[in-house]
Amino acid sequence: MKDNILDIVKNNIVENNLIKENDKIIVAVSGGPDSMCLLDSLFRLKDELKIHLVVAHVNHGIRKESDDEKIYVENYCNKRNIPFYYLKGNIPELSKEKKMSEEACGREVRYNFFEKVRREEQAVSIAVAHNLNDNIETILLNLIRGSGLKGLTGMDFRYNNIIRPLLTIEKKDILLYNNELELNPCIDKTNEEEIYLRNKIRLSLIPYLKELNPNFNTNISRMRNILKEDNEFIEEYTNNIFKNIIVEEEDSKITFNYSYIMNEHDSIKKRLVRKIIEKKISNLDGIESIHVLDIIKLLNNNIKGKKYIIGNKFTIEIVKKNIAVIY
């Protein structure tokens, strides 16, 4: 299994241009089976790929076992001379302050820390351990939440600075890799508790769907690939339009010509509005379909001085016919 996994990881990296020679990579490692497979496989490939590794580990301050997990990951790194960065937080307290779920807050803290380490180390990318099973769970999670086409394609090998070298590997093969190499990873028992929607999908929904169709994983992966092709075509079309929309970019605001938006099909209008928002605030966290539809309605009315405000995230204002600013 070791050689098979190493071949797949190397092929995923090369075929998807995830890593280049002399790249420095931040590896996000929890100490669990997935992240240890990721770290160990990259370590075994580092000389062949000519890359440099740095490990980042986060203790969320939720479980007692977290201190032991930190020691486990740090020991692995010390034995192999891999630089190790560590953050200990208090997610239960912070999530209450921010009025977020612990799951969402933990994710935000993790990725902010990984990006901080990436900048300090002048690294190129952050490698995370999402695998094929994670991707199927994500697709089902998005389906349940009423996602659009993009959400039904799941995760990509690359998203901005994030890379996922294990994305085509099944969980069962990752566990075999760990056993074969006697990595003895840490086990987060909360993953076996149905306390989060994702856990419920993993523990109850997917096993039931596999009872209905034993080829469920294969069929979902095939569907995902079909939808991804369609989405890539629509994205390319949208990006070609988007190039003409931006009139001026300043530190605090972006001026855009929305006549290019209003002339398009409703599907493309929504994508273009999302791209403008993402360009301004760098993400689409908390942006729902109703917000996008309200913004399109604002632009369609074309009344100078009218505004659309989403909390402290951004404001869109009509400044003259066909011209608006987002700030």
Image (cartoon, rainbow, N blue to C red):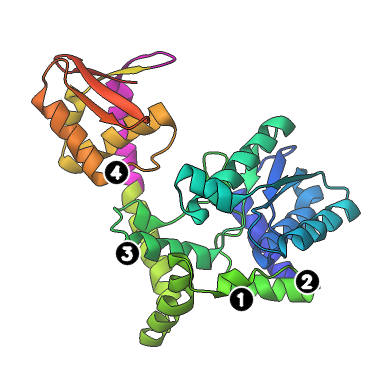
At mark 2, the secondary structure is loop
Query: Which disc is residue 234 wearing?
Result: 4
- Residue wearing tag 2: 184
Q: Tell me if 24 is positioned left or right of 105 in this view.
A: right
Q: Amino acid at mark 4?
A: Ile
Q: Earlier in the sequence, mark 1 or mark 4?
A: 1
- Residue at image location 36% in from the left, 65% down from the top: 223
Magenta region: which residues? 232-252
Q: Tell me if 276 is positioned left or right of 269 in this view.
A: right
At mark 4, the secondary structure is helix
Q: Amino acid at mark 3?
A: Ile
Q: Nearer the viewer, residue 69 or 136?
A: 69
Q: Nearer the viewer, mark 4 or mark 3?
A: 3
Contact? badges 4 and 3 (CB < 8 Å): no
- Residue wearing tag 3: 144
Q: Position of residue 2 (x, y in %)?
A: 74, 69
Q: Nearer the viewer, mark 1 or mark 2?
A: 2
Contact? badges 4 and 2 (CB < 8 Å): no
